[in-house]
Image: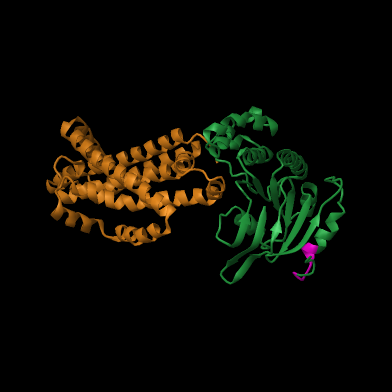
Amino acid sequence: MKKNLIFSALSIVFLWLVWVIAYFIVRNDYLLPSFWDTFRAMGELFADASFWRAFGNTLLRTVIAFAVSFVLGAAFAALACMNGGVRAFLSPVVSVLRTVPTMAIILILLLWTNALVAPVIVTLLVLFPAMYAAMLAAADEVRAEYGELVRAFKVPARRAVVKLYAPLCAPAVLAQSGSVLSMGLKITVSGEVLSQTFRSLGGMMQNAQLFIEMPTLLALTLLVVAAGFLLEGGCALLKRAAVRWRA
Amino acid sequence: MKLFSLKKSYGDKVALDLSDIEFSAGQITAVLGESGAGKSTLLSCIAESIPHEGKVEGAGKVSYLFQKPHLLPNLTVEGNLRFVLEKGEWSRIFDMLSRVGLSEKACSRPYELSGGERQRVAIARAFLFPHDTLLMDEPFSSLDLSLKRSLMELTREMCEEKGETVIFVTHDVREAVFLARRAVVLKRGKLIADLPVEGERDFFRPHPAEEALVRALTAEECDKFSS
């Protein structure tokens, strides 16, 4: 565990060194700003209230899209687990959602909705297949192990869901939720950039690019990465708190 | 319990094809056979968990003892027993736990129990669940000898106390003659032997019925032991 932490820290140091070396090779602040300039820009962002408002809006969009995809994924996975017809019906729908280009969806959604809503919907459409697949796989695994027990003792459906399926699916679903949530943040920011959403991290990135403020752009990028890490860490903590038993 | 012309096929393959057969209440009947003989299919037909031809009469409510304990890892021992019971039946849990020697483990989770203790919980669950017929699908096959013997003795005592119909599927002749009063042998879905298992039984000494059962199990032809 301790050894792994050291390797993870070494990896971050390695990336930082690559940046420093690349900076000295490129020697062009407009193409690649220095670490210190970026660090300074990050400090300025922290002191700026509009950054926090934008950060909150982007995070809220991500969480809304994630929550809706979680609920829809759970509902459809439950239906698909119980009924082979629903599973077959949803299979091509999920495949289409998985393969359709994200940018194409954003452009279409911008025609149908507005810049505030489009990033939420696009994130939801990208996250739903991932949540659905994770939940269906977890439910299938539980059913393969305990389905015989439930059938033999004629356990009522409500009790089976509350005492068996929900708790035993939780570890796999929560483990997947971290990476899905982090991916959701990435998609939301992409959507905001393309939609030029006002008071959002994506909108701020778009402005920084427009005014060639490379340190700010890079600082915003690093902050999105850090937020993604925090979301993944939060899910891991939630999993640890929620799952207190061992298989 | 009576079975009338029970038949089950998977595509072209006949998994079970029995003529009429009766199982007495209060008697443990062992069903022997090699893999693919139709033993588990027979249990599924009795439990009506798969569609089949023919009729099962008088099975009533069925309880199950599986090969694996199938305990929910998120629930305690008591929680696992509650999982299959209605609220009104919870009061019997502690009596049953002390019967199987697990009253101290009511609050333990399955990962804190040994393999034998887990199977004891499964036995408690099978007997607690209100039933007329108990189906056992090789529940002792993965246990070591001494544990197997003690759990089989416990199961036999409890079966005899309750006087219910018990169908015990196994591929182990020694287990069959130790636990059952009657043994039937299935081969390729057909009943090829139906023998009483009488007299004293000792787990560590061969029983006279074993020879006939081994002959039936190893017979090449399906009709060799037909009555």
Q: Position of residue B96 (x, y in %)?
A: 65, 32
- The percent position of residue A153, horizontal first and vertical second, equals 56, 45
| Image location of residue A145, percent across then percent down | 54, 49
Residue A95 is drawn in which quadrant? Answer: bottom left
Q: In this view, does A133 lie to the left or right of A191?
A: right
Q: In this view, does A208 lie above or below B57?
A: above
Specify the quadrant that holds the C terminus of chain B.
bottom right
Residue located farthest toward the top when viewing the structure as drawn: B104
Write down the region rendered in magenta: B216-222
Residue depicted at x 54% and y 32%: B88
Point 64% across, 36% down: residue: B113
Looking at the image, residue B73 lies above or below residue B135: above
Q: Is residue A21 above or below residue B19?
A: above
Q: Is residue B221 magenta?
A: yes
> In the rendered picture, chain B carries what hue?
green
Residue B99 on the magenta segment: no
- Chain that is coloured orange in the picture: A
Q: Which of B217 and B147 is in front in this view?
A: B217
Tag count:
0
- In the rendered structure, the answer to whether residue B116 lies left or right of residue B174 reads left
Q: Is residue A53 above or below residue B28?
A: above
Counting from the top left corner in percent of width and height, residue B178 is at: 80, 47
